[in-house]
Image (spheres, grey):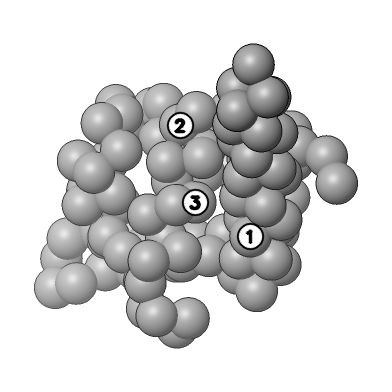
Amino acid sequence: MSADEIIHQSTRLRIMATLNTLERREMLEFTRLKAIVGATDGNLGAHLDTLARAGYVDIEKLFVGRRPQTRVKATTSGRRAFRGHVTFLRKIIDQAEATQRRK
């Protein structure tokens, strides 16, 4: 198993970790995600575009009253990719810990 180069970038990893805490059909508002991830509007938008092009997130743009609202959720393939990347990271950690115990 190898790293998922799309998810591996730290901001995208935080985005996917956040979205994976939601129920499958639940969406998170852009402004809330921005606050959780600690990104600017432009930075978050660029990372979401990358994730959307990979098929890892769905982005919904709508109006609530007269105000625009953007909501995001992880797709099934995005959740699968995130789980695979977490498995990859855990393997690295486990190997490092095993090496430390042998010393």
Q: N-terminal of the two: label 2 or label 3?
A: 2
- Frontmost of labels 3 and 1 is 1
Q: Which mark is residue 83?
A: 1
Q: N-terminal of the two: label 3 or label 1?
A: 3
Residue 2, image x and y in percent?
Answer: 83, 39
- The disc labelled 2 sits on which kind of residue? Thr
Q: CA distance from mark 1 to mark 2?
A: 16 Å
Above/below status of 47 relative to 53? above
Q: From the image, tell me which residue sits under label 3.
A: 16
- The disc labelled 1 sits on which kind of residue? Arg
Do tag 2 and tag 3 residues touch (Cβ < 8 Å)?
no
Q: Residue at x 53, y 65 (%)?
A: 74
The secondary element bearing badge 3 is classed as helix
Q: Which mark is residue 11?
A: 2
Q: Residue at x 70, y 43 (%)?
A: 91
Q: Residue at x 51, y 40 (%)?
A: 13
Crowding around mark 3 (Cα neighbors within 10 Å: few <14, some 14 to 19, many 20+) is many
Name the foreground residue: 3 vs 40.
3
Q: CA distance from mark 3 to mark 1?
A: 10 Å
Name the foreground residue: 82 vs 44.
82
Q: N-terminal of the two: label 1 or label 2?
A: 2
Residue furthest to the front in view is 103
Q: Residue at x 60, y 22 (%)?
A: 100
Image quadrant in which you'd find residue 98: top right
